């Protein structure tokens, strides 16, 4: 029989949205609880100018399993961070219900 090790959590303070951690490192945004079956991963592929600042333009969306295999449940691409996060949240909720 295979031995299972308990999952550990990372200590520290993170931004939370709807009770789940939202972490950004560089152009990668990860949303979700690693103890659940799936998480949402957003990869900012390109930026565009909006006045004096650059905002995310093309965003690659993935819902990944957290079981160590990083199996892709669903993936796609959207223009704009808001649209990408919005559709990604829907996909994540559906994946967690299945």
Image (tube, helix red, strand yellow):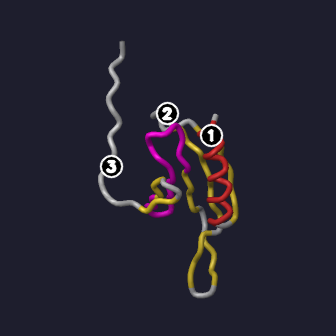
7 lies left or right of 59? left
Which quadrant: the C terminus?
A: top right
- Residue 35 lies in the magenta stretch: yes
Q: Which residue lies furthest to the bottom in this view?
A: 52
Q: Residue 29 in the image: x percent, y percent?
A: 51, 58
**Residue tagged 2:** 69
Which quadrant: the N terminus?
A: top left
Reading the chain from its start, which is encountered first: label 2 or label 1?
2
Task: State how far apart marks 2 and 3 are (Cα).
Answer: 20 Å
**Residue tagged 3:** 10
Task: State how far apart marks 2 and 1 are (Cα).
Answer: 16 Å
Question: For numbered disc 3, what is the local secondary structure?
Answer: loop
Reading the chain from its start, which is encountered first: label 2 or label 3?
3
- Tell which tag, 2 or 3, sits nearer the viewer: 3
Q: In this view, does 75 lie above or below 57?
A: above
Determine contact: label 1, label 3, CB under 8 Å. no
Task: State how far apart marks 1 and 3 are (Cα).
Answer: 24 Å
Question: For numbered disc 1, what is the local secondary structure?
Answer: helix
9 lies left or right of 85? left
Mark 2 surroundings: few (<14), some (14-19) or many (≥20) residues within 10 A = few
Q: Is residue 5 above or below residue 52?
A: above
Q: Which residue is drawn at 63% across and 75% down?
A: 48
Mark 3 surroundings: few (<14), some (14-19) or many (≥20) residues within 10 A = few
Residue 84 numbered tag: none
Mark 1 surroundings: few (<14), some (14-19) or many (≥20) residues within 10 A = some
Q: Which residue is drawn at 45% across and 34% down?
A: 68
Q: Residue 56 in the image: x percent, y percent?
A: 60, 69
Q: Which residue lies furthest to the front in this view?
A: 19
Q: Which residue range is magenta in the image?
A: 23-40
Q: Residue 59 in the image: x percent, y percent?
A: 63, 60
Residue placed most toward the observer, 2 or 53: 2
Residue 95 numbered tag: 1
């Amino acid at each position: 029989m295979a031995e299972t090790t308990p999952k550990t959590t990372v200590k520290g303070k993170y931004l939370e949205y709807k009770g789940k951690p939202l972490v950004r490192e560089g152009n990668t945004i990860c949303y979700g609880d690693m103890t659940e079956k799936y998480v949402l991963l957003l990869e900012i592929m390109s930026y565009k100018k909006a006045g004096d600042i650059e905002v995310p333009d093309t965003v690659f969306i993935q819902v990944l399993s957290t079981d160590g295999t990083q199996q892709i449940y669903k993936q796609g691409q959207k223009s704009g961070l808001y649209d990408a996060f919005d559709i990604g949240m829907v996909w994540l909720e559906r994946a967690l219900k299945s």
